[in-house]
Image (cartoon, rainbow, N blue to C red):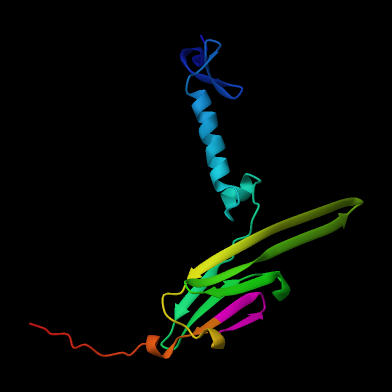
Amino acid sequence: MPIRDLIPWRREGRGLVRGGEEHPLSGLHREMNRLFEDFVRGWDLPLARSLGRLDTFVPSVDVRETDKAVVVSAELPGMDENDIKVELADDGLTISGEKKTETDEEHEGISRHERTYGSFQRFVAIPVQVQEAKTTAEFRNGVLTVTLPKAPEAQAKRKKIQIKTD
C-alpha cells in the first residue's frame, strides 16, 4: 500500500480533498488568502510586489526637530518638482504627487514596454507652532526638504536639571 493512501487529507486542485469531497475549511482558506491580498494591495513591500499588485508609491519620510525648526525630508527618486505638491495646514504638512515610471527596452528583436503610474500622499503632524511665511521647500537629487521655522514662542528654552544622588 502506498504511503499516500494512509494520509486522510491531501491537496488536489485548489483545496484539501478527502475521498473526493472538498474539506470544509478550504473555502475559508481561499477567502482568507483573498482578504490578505486585498489588504496588502498597494503596499511598497517585496511581498506585495511578488503578488503583482503594487499600485502605489510610498516615499520614505524623515522628520527631525531642532531648537529653531522642524525639518521634513522625503525621498522622491525619479520625480520632478512639478509633480510634487506641498501644503501646510494647522495640524501638519501634506506631501503629495504622482509618480510616473516608463521603461522601454529592445533586445534581440524583442521589445518590452512598462508603464507605472501611481499617486501618493504623506501627512506629517507638526506638533509645534511654525512660521508659515518663512517655511521653505527645496528639491535636490530626488530629495525634498521642507524647513518649517518654529514660532518664537515654540522655540525650545532649555534648562539643565540637576540630578540628585543618594
| Residue at horizontal 79 percent and vertical 59 percent from the top | 103
- Tally of numbered discs: 0
With respect to residue 16, does 60 lie above or below?
A: below
Residue 143 inside the magenta-drawn segment: yes
The segment highlighted magenta reads 135-146
In the image, 112 versus 139, the foreground residue is: 139
Query: What residue occupies the far right of the structure in this picture?
Result: 109
Dominant SS in magenta: strand
Rendered location of residue 61, percent (x, y)? 54, 70
Residue at image coords 67%, 70%: 77
Which residue does the image show at 58% across and 79% down from the upper left? 145
Q: Which one is in front, 65 or 91?
A: 91
- Residue nearest the viewer, comparing 145 with 87: 87
Q: What percent of the width, then of the height, locates residue 133?
A: 55, 87
Which residue occupies the foreground of this view, 2 or 16?
16
Q: The C terminus lies in which quarter of the figure?
A: bottom left
- Left or right? Give the position of 155 relative to 13: left
Residue at x 87% of width, y 55% of height: 107
Residue occupying the far left of the picture: 166
> Horizontally, is 111 left or right of 17 in the view?
right
Quarter where residue 66 is shown:
bottom left
Determine if the magenta segment contains residue 11: no
Q: Is residue 116 above or below residue 71?
A: above
Dividing the picture into quadrants, the one containing residue 14 is top right
Extreme front residue here?
A: 90
Q: Position of residue 71 (x, y in %)?
A: 51, 80
Q: Is residue 76 above or below residue 43?
A: below
